Amino acid sequence: MKFINKLEENIIGVGLLTSVLLVFVNVILRYILKSSSTWIEEVVRYLIIWITFIGSAVCFRRMSHMGIDLIFSFVKGGLKKTVEIFIIIASIVFMSFMFKYGIDLVVFTRASGQITPALGVKLYMIYVGIPFGAFLSLFELVQLLFKKLKEVPAQ
């Protein structure tokens, strides 16, 4: 588990660092040399897709999604555990749909042979980040659900 957690965080870190550096280079190219690169914009866009979906799993693991925190601020006492479990189950349902339709998108773009405009990379390779991130999120959410269910006192 620690390996997967570290891998997720490293992918996000490297992706963010790469994105920042590429955007910085593109700003220099645009404003100093009066020429920008379209492939940089494309790489950054695709890195952000991966960062977002892998980052979602990290946020679920840490229970740090903003919407979840907002809901918890309104709920107190014994109802909080019930709401936590409901939110986790709703998130599992949502991520299941995201996983299924992400796979459908990957299959469709692979079959259609679409490629990215500037890089010429097969588009399905970019979209693999969606079901991959959804799978990681589902993995974290199921673990979290079992942890929360163990915490619920028997009645």
Image (tube, rainbow, N blue to C red):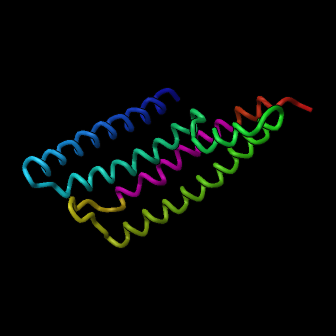
Viewer-proximal residue, 26 or 142?
26
Task: Judge from the rendering whether residue 68 lies leftward or rightward of residue 77; answer left or right.
Answer: left
Please name the residue shown 83% across and 33% down the image.
Answer: 78
Viewer-proximal residue, 105 or 34?
34
The single residue placed furthest to the left in the displayed view is 33
Please name the residue shown 76% across and 42% down the image.
Answer: 83
Please name the residue shown 27% across and 52% down the image.
Answer: 43
Q: Quadrant of residue 77?
A: top right
- For the record, the magenta segment spans 125-145
The single residue placed furthest to the top in the displayed view is 2
Task: Judge from the rendering whether residue 128 lies leftward or rightward of residue 92; answer left or right.
Answer: left
Q: Quadrant of residue 75?
A: top right
In this view, 21 is above or below 95: above
Q: Position of residue 31 (x, y in %)?
A: 13, 49
The single residue placed furthest to the right in the displayed view is 155
User: How many numbered marks appear?
Assistant: 0
The single residue placed furthest to the bottom in the displayed view is 112
Q: Position of residue 154 (x, y in %)?
A: 88, 31
In this view, 123 is above or below 15: below
Which quarter of the figure is the C terminus placed in? top right
Q: Position of residue 88 (x, y in %)?
A: 68, 44
Q: Position of residue 25 (x, y in %)?
A: 17, 43
Q: Main secondary structure of the magenta part?
A: helix
In this view, 39 is above or below 137: below
Task: Judge from the rendering whether residue 152 lies leftward or rightward of residue 22; answer left or right.
Answer: right
Residue 12 magenta-highlighted? no
Residue 136 magenta-highlighted? yes
Please name the residue shown 28% across and 66% down the image.
Answer: 115
Task: Judge from the rendering whether residue 133 lies leftward or rightward of residue 140; answer left or right.
Answer: left
Viewer-proximal residue, 112 or 68?
68
